[in-house]
Image: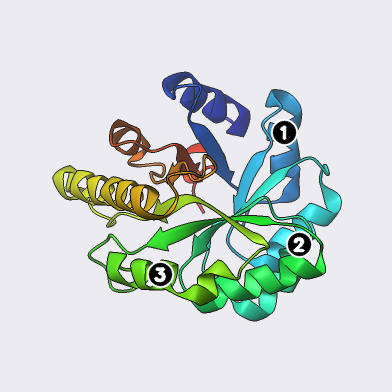
Amino acid sequence: MNCVDRFKAIREKVPSNIKIVAVSKTKPATLIEQLYTATGHKTFGENKAQELNEKHSVLASDIDWHFIGHLQTNKIKYIAPYVGLVQSVDSFKLLSEIDKEAKKQNRVIPCLLQFHIATEESKYGFSIEEAKRMLDDPLFQELRNILPCGVMGMATFTDNQQLVRKEFNMLHYYFTAIKTSYFSQQPDFREISMGMTDDYLLAIDEGSTIIRIGSGIFGGR
């Protein structure tokens, strides 16, 4: 199966209201173009600013690019003019820098708050306490060029589905708690990005609205 066939097979399994981010990191622009042309799919995910910039420069202008990796503050300026969603906001410093660069571009950049839900210490993200402290801080209220749209998290890389389900359930709980306390009047705060190639059906079962599929579409890296 090629990437088009694999995408169509996944799309058939996934409810139409769930957004699929085709994670195209390390894959050539030609594969993205192939999927885009054959299916009309427009949402792609990258985890490095330079690679994203290179692909953006040669591919269709209406592609909705999601940044899904650990974003360094000095790289924001390269993607700020066009990025559709930064899924991996894991600090106030990063959020404020996104706000600053978005202001220069006269736009508002949608963002997700990334939470640390996995057992691996190597993964990034807020704790629920850290997120609440940030959201309570008056400095957060001064940010005008970012739009918080929800939460993102990565589960532990394991075959233990019970653990993965527990972690997805935890992220859903974090979303509900923050939505209720801080964004109850903001309809844009509605996304829960969780689930990848090996666990996306479990994630959907636990309330995911965005899944990030890489090898399941484009093959191994």
Give SS at disc 2. helix
- Image coordinates of residue 141 in percent, x first then y, are 54, 68
- Image coordinates of residue 26 in percent, x first then y, are 61, 57
User: Can the viewer see residue 78 in this picture?
Assistant: no
Residue 138 to residue 80: above or below: below
Query: Closer to the camera: disc 2 or disc 3?
Result: 3
- Image coordinates of residue 186 in percent, x first then y, are 51, 44
Task: Calculate the distance from the C-alpha at mark 2 to the C-alpha at mark 1.
Answer: 18 Å
Instruction: Between residue 218 and residue 75, name the one nearer to us.
Output: 75
Is the Cβ of the residue at disc 2 closer than 8 Å to that at disc 1? Answer: no
Give SS at disc 3. helix
Q: Earlier in the sequence, mark 1 or mark 3?
A: 1
- Image coordinates of residue 176 in percent, x first then y, are 32, 46
Q: Which residue is mark 2?
A: 53
The crowding category of the residue bearing disc 2, from other C-alpha atoms within 10 Å (few below 14, some 14 to 19, many at least 20), is some
**Lateral position of residue 21 relative to residue 166, left or right:** right
Residue at left offset 52%, top offset 70%: 140
Q: Which quadrant of the figure has residue 124? A: bottom left
Q: Which mark is residue 36?
A: 1
The crowding category of the residue bearing disc 3, from other C-alpha atoms within 10 Å (few below 14, some 14 to 19, many at least 20), is few
Residue at left offset 53%, top offset 76%: 139
User: Can the viewer see residue 107 in this picture?
Assistant: yes
